[in-house]
Image: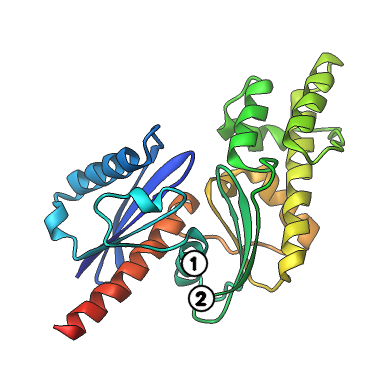
């Protein structure tokens, strides 16, 4: 049985194909202006890589903010459920998942089967999201992929005091004008982002083990700050953290495909 999951996010779109409960392949692209076209482009690319066609897919589930417009999806499931399911499938000891995406971040608590028990979401402010981190990286003249490593070079991290994305950007401009070191500013960004995430985690109730999904999970500075603040070490996944929502979507697709087979 071959199933697929497609996670259409605000910054990136991901696709995963499972065959007999194992990952056959995955793909990630930058999201286009059209969410539906993003889904088609990423799935076309993955199918070509695996030498498959759409007719080979028994069932597909869409997720992410663009899940309702995935043209080839048979169903859609929320990204909260998909990140919980995918993360737990990859690391069964997980009970709390931090998902930091392009436009929001979430704290998700799951049971021993990977199903969501509770969650909290910060979607009122862009602070700490992938989009805001991209803007801050641009202010420092670096790519977002360099922001984490840069923060580790800090000798005297600055203290940023405004959790609001807009106010933080203003603070950063002032610090640059004052001649503060870019590495020290990058460390300040990591710290204030981590503190915002920790606050959200405590509202949902912290339970170990903890793992982080989404693109910001690749930001070593934020991950280090979170581990220090929470006094723990995060579970490390064997796959790219961006694709875990798509993995969860594919697992839900497998469930649905199996049910359909049992009905026929």
Which quadrant of the rendered structure holds the C terminus?
bottom left
> 12 left or right of 48?
right
Q: Residue at x 73, y 58 (%)?
A: 200
Give yes or no for contact between labels 1 and 2 (Cβ–Cβ under 8 Å): yes
Q: Quadrant of residue 74?
A: bottom left
* Rendered view: 55 above or below 10: below
Mark 1 lies on a secondary structure that is helix
Q: Quadrant of residue 141?
A: top right
- Between 103 and 220, the one nearer to me in the picture: 103
Q: Extreme front residue here?
A: 68
- Between 222 and 149, the one nearer to me in the picture: 222
- Tell me the number on the disc at residue 115: 2
Residue 180 seen in this snapshot:
no
Residue 224: x %, y % from top left: 71, 50
* Rendered view: 149 above or below 139: below
Residue 122: x %, y % from top left: 67, 52
Which comes before the other along the chain, label 1 or label 2?
A: 1
Q: Residue at x 14, y 59 (%)?
A: 56
Neighbour tally class for label 1: few under 14, some 14-19, many 20 plus, Cα within 10 Å: many
> 119 left or right of 227?
left
- Tell me the number on the disc at residue 81: 1
Q: Quadrant of residue 45?
A: top left
Residue 223: x %, y % from top left: 67, 50
How is the structure coloured here?
rainbow
* Rendered view: 131 above or below 121: above
Compute the Cα span from label 1 to label 2: 7 Å
């Amino acid at each position: 049985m071959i199933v697929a999951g497609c996670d259409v996010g605000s910054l990136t779109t991901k696709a995963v194909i499972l065959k007999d409960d194992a990952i056959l392949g995955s793909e990630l692209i930058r999201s286009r202006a059209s969410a539906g076209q993003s889904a088609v482009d990423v799935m076309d690319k993955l199918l070509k890589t695996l030498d498959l066609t759409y007719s080979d897919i028994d069932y597909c589930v869409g997720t992410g903010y663009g899940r309702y417009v995935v043209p080839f999806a048979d169903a859609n499931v929320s990204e909260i459920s998909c990140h919980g399911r995918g993360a737990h499938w990859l690391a069964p000891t997980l009970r709390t998942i931090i998902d930091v995406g392009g436009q929001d971040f979430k704290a998700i608590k799951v049971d021993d089967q990977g199903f969501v028990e509770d969650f909290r979401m910060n979607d009122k402010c862009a602070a700490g999201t992938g989009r805001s981190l991209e803007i801050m990286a641009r202010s420092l003249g670096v790519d977002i992929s360099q922001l984490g490593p840069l923060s580790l070079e800090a000798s005297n991290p600055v203290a940023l005091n405004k959790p609001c994305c807009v106010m933080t950007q203003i603070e950063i401009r002032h610090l640059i004008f004052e001649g503060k070191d870019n590495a020290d500013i990058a460390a300040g960004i990591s710290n204030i982002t981590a503190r915002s995430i920790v606050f959200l985690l405590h509202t949902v109730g912290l339970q170990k083990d903890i793992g982080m999904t989404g693109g910001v999970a690749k930001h070593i500075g934020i991950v280090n700050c979170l581990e220090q603040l929470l006094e723990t070490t995060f579970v490390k996944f064997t796959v790219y953290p961006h694709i875990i929502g798509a993995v969860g979507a594919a697992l839900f697709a497998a469930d649905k495909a199996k049910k359909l087979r049992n009905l026929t």
